Amino acid sequence: MQKKVFVIYLFYRGFAVFSLLLTGVFVFLLFKLGIAAFFPIFWAKVMLNVIGSFFYFEYKSTELPFYYNFGVSKEVLFLACNTFDVMIFIFLIIILI
């Protein structure tokens, strides 16, 4: 179990630059526009995360067998990275607004 979590962390480490930058921009927009803009901002973030994930998977396609050897599928990597990023987004919203 610890190996799988570490392998997911290794994958997320490269994706984090894009996702955390996106999170910062959307939290700033939400701070400026107010809580009434939460749903459009939330869904824009989710859609851009999914699109960014697909591009990142294409970029890392030669490294995917490494993750498969540890028993972590592409779907698990996708769900873990995007779920963790949405949790960070919601946590920052709760803290800052």
Image: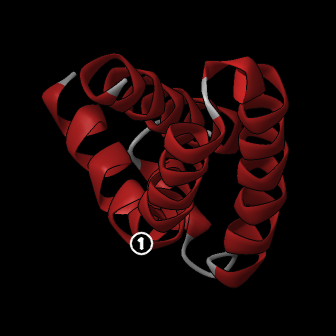
Residue at the image position 66 percent from the left and 40 percent from the top: 33
Residue at position x 37%, y 23% from top? 97
Question: Which residue, given by chain and number where applicable, does mark 1 sit on?
Answer: 17
Q: Nearer the viewer, residue 75 or 80?
A: 80
Residue beneath the point at 82% across and 31% down: 43
Residue 45 percent location from the top left of the image:
72, 44
Q: Residue 20 appears in which quarter of the rendering?
A: bottom left
Q: Residues within 10 Å of mark 1 (few under 14, many from 20)?
A: few
**Which element type, helix, strand or loop, lies under badge 1?**
helix
Q: Look at 41% across and 26% down and name the residue there.
A: 93
Of the pair 66 and 43, the residue shown nearer to us: 43
Task: Using the image as rendered, state which of residue 7 and residue 36 is in the foreground.
Answer: 36
- Residue 90 vertical position relative to residue 3 in the rendered view, above or below: above
User: Residue extending furthest left?
Assistant: 2
Does residue 27 appear left or right of residue 57 in this picture?
A: left
Q: What colouring style does the render use?
A: secondary structure
Residue 61 lies in quadrant: bottom right
Quadrant of the image for the N terminus?
top left
Residue 95, given in percent of the width and then of the height, sits at 25, 22
- Dot 1 amino acid type: Val
* Residue 91 to residue 76: above or below: above
- In the image, taking residue 34 as reference, residue 24 lies left or right, namely left
- x then y, percent, for residue 15: 48, 65
Horizontal relation, residue 10 to residue 16: left or right? left
Residue 39: give x, y in percent of width and height: 79, 21
Counting every numbered tag in the picture gives 1
